[in-house]
Amino acid sequence: MPLDNLGDTFSEATKATVQAFQRTRGLEITGVVDSTTWSRLLEAGWGLGDRLLYLVKPYLRGDDVAELQVRLSQLGFDPGRVDGVFGPLLDRALSEFQRNCGLESNGTLTQRTLVELRRFSPFTDRTLVSEARDEAGFAQTQRGPIIVWGRSPLTQTIAQRLPYVDADEIRATWGVEELASYANSVGALGVIALSEQDDWNGVHLHYWSSYQSYSHRGEQLASAVANAISRDDIGLRVEVTGMAVPILRETQMTTLHVEHGALNAKESRLLTEAISAAIRDFFHS
């Protein structure tokens, strides 16, 4: 239903529209306009060419940034994954495109750069170079630790079973942005984020997926963990879903978001063993 026809009352129709938007953005489908949903709504209002795009902190975010990433990636310039965030990789890819076009290589999407970008953009969909590199395994250049983080009784027990791990309990109080900034700065090999949801049943495994991009390695890791849980016959229902919740969007490395319900002692032990073994094999085989 078009937003113009919803009126000024938050009705069931409005809730359904919010849920539909959350679904397209890989967010938790609640129908509630929380801070994350609101920020994504604002980002959706930007079209390519509506504003100058360049590297600045805090990073510019929006659908225009995502479209720029897609267009450059289709042309063979690697801006990293398509996440709608104008970071250093996009700055470098845009500068390389400008240099190839004989333009001033300043990493700023000016009108002149946009004209050239549209002129060279393909009329049909092409494989994104960032996707091809991720699928081939070339995008995984981090050599830092595996960071295990989150408010879950499994956090420390899983961390104790992994080699070269960073699970300092002081970071348990950090928010997503602070944790992601730290993980990116140390070049973490991977991030495992865990949370317990008392009203949930089973285990939900999430990897990055949004816009026209998803993490091949994230999906592979989530699938490996799901297979390990199922193979060990723990008796818990397992779901694997691509999402774009903040912890998956803000971290640049392979990240797995694990959400689980309340567990008894046996379930905790078996789940810890299955998850840690799958993660260890995935990163260190």
Image: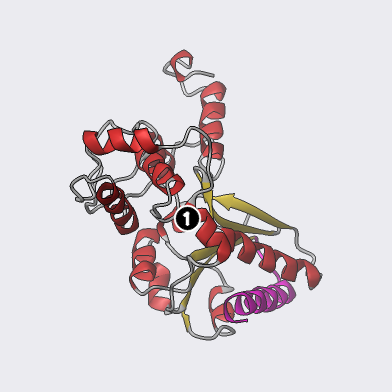
Q: Report the span colored magenta.
A: 261-285
Q: Main secondary structure of the magenta part?
A: helix
Answer whether residue 132 is visible to the viewer in this image: yes
Question: Mark 1: which amino acid?
Answer: Ser
Provide the secondary structure element on which disc 1 rests: helix
180 or 13: nearer the viewer: 180
251 or 197: nearer the viewer: 251
Position of residue 81 relative to residue 30, above or below, is below
Q: Quadrant of the N terminus?
A: top right
| Residue placed under numbered mark 1 in the picture | 130
| Circle 1 residues within 10 Å: few <14, some 14–19, many ≥20 | many
Position of residue 121 relative to residue 257, above or below, is above
Is 283 magenta? The answer is yes
Q: Where is residue 163 shown, x and y percent of the image? A: 54, 86
Q: Where is residue 23 shown, x and y percent of the image? A: 56, 38
Q: Residue at x 18, y 47 (%)?
A: 104
Position of residue 235 relative to residue 90, above or below, is below
Q: Where is residue 42 shown, x and y percent of the image? A: 35, 35
Left or right, 100 with respect to 128, comes to: left
Q: Residue at x 53, y 27 (%)?
A: 17
Q: Quadrant of residue 251?
A: bottom left
Answer whether residue 148 is visible to the viewer in this image: no
Q: Quadrant of the C terminus?
A: bottom right
Q: Quadrant of residue 64?
A: top left
Q: Residue at x 63, y 63 (%)?
A: 220
109 or 126: nearer the viewer: 126
Left or right, 233 with respect to 214, comes to: right
